[in-house]
Amino acid sequence: MVEIFLKTLPFFLIIGLGYGAGRTRFFPEDATAWLTRFVFYFALSAMLFRFSANLSLAEIYDAKFILAYLSGTAAIYLLATAVTLIRGRGVEEAAVEAQCAVIGNVGFLGVPMLVLLLGPQAIGPVMLVLAVDLIVFGSLIVILITGSRDGRVSLGVLRTVGLGLLKNPMIVSIAIGLSWAALEIPIPDPLNEFVSILGAAATPGALFAIGASLASKSAERLTTAGWLSFCKLVLHPLAVAGAALLLFGVERYAAGVMIAAAALPVAGNVYILAQHYGVAPHRVSATILISTALSIFTVSAVIAWVG
């Protein structure tokens, strides 16, 4: 456990460095926004393309893996939704809180950290988790909130969701990489060097951006934020572990990567959605802050367990 903690510590130290820079205003919110954009559209996309271009769809596609992750995640999603509705909140707040309970920071934190800690073969399972999060649950929150406001789910909403997925650079880079691999086209040396150098900026850039963005978050509404953090850091990996190991019999290494990915803290894009739709942004902000702080210990414990 101590050895794993020391291995994960540098990742969280970079997050802490970003937090300090943001908190002291040495790195203002505008700078954080631009750094996040650079990582999201360029560095992380280059990393995902390089990884996926050296894989094949047959290597990473695993129906049992996807069903196990979907089942475990859906169980916690429904639990968080039920608790929100029992508290007398509406469908919109339920959708946002459920998103907090199951959507981890797989893109910015999980891809670089889990691949380094669990080995390069972890990239396939991590990509599947990322794809399910983006395609299924990323679409679901938009459909639920918009449908609740309009009283129905229109073709316009579905079109917006579809276009959003097509414009997401993480999905696009993975799709291009897998297509490249399927065509068995060798990557030219200059292109390989280009994406390697650019992708190398993803890890420090993403971690620093996470920390800097946390500096603007406030720890309000601690009871709900604490409950949602518990869902994300404890209940979600437990539910996924049960589904993967007991129900679907997922291969143990892939199951371990899935469980570790499920243990990651709440993703920052949940806050962006909450702010965009004006639904409980302060609650989401507090949950991201608390879950990220606690994940220093919980993620290390989970990785030590699955390892």
Image (cartoon, grey):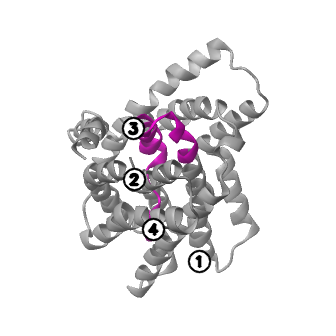
Where does residue 242 sit, x and y in percent of width and height? Answer: 47, 67
Task: Tell me which residue sits at (64%, 80%) in the image.
Answer: 151
What's under tag 4, amino acid-wise? Ala
Asked if the residue under mark 2 is in contact with the one under mark 3, i.e. CB atoms within 8 Å, the reply is: no
Q: Which mark is residue 264?
A: 2
Magenta residue check for 109: yes
Disc 4 designates what residue?
239
What's under tag 1, amino acid-wise? Ser
Magenta residue check for 222: no
**Magenta part of the protein: which range?**
97-126
Task: Tell me which residue sits at (42%, 33%) in the image.
Answer: 203
Disc 1 designates what residue?
148
Rounded to the nearest angstrom, the CA distance separating label 1 from label 4 is 28 Å
Count the labels in the image.
4
Where does residue 109 sit, x and y in percent of width and height? Answer: 41, 43
Rounded to the nearest angstrom, the CA distance separating label 3 from label 2 is 14 Å
Going by the image, does 142 lie left or right of 245?
right
Q: In the rendered view, would you say 77 is above or below 209?
A: below
Of the numbered discs 3 and 2, the one sitting upstream in the chain is 3
Rounded to the nearest angstrom, the CA distance separating label 3 from label 1 is 42 Å
Q: In the rendered view, would you say 170 is above or below 92?
A: above
Disc 3 designates what residue?
117
Closer to the camera in the image, 304 or 187? 304
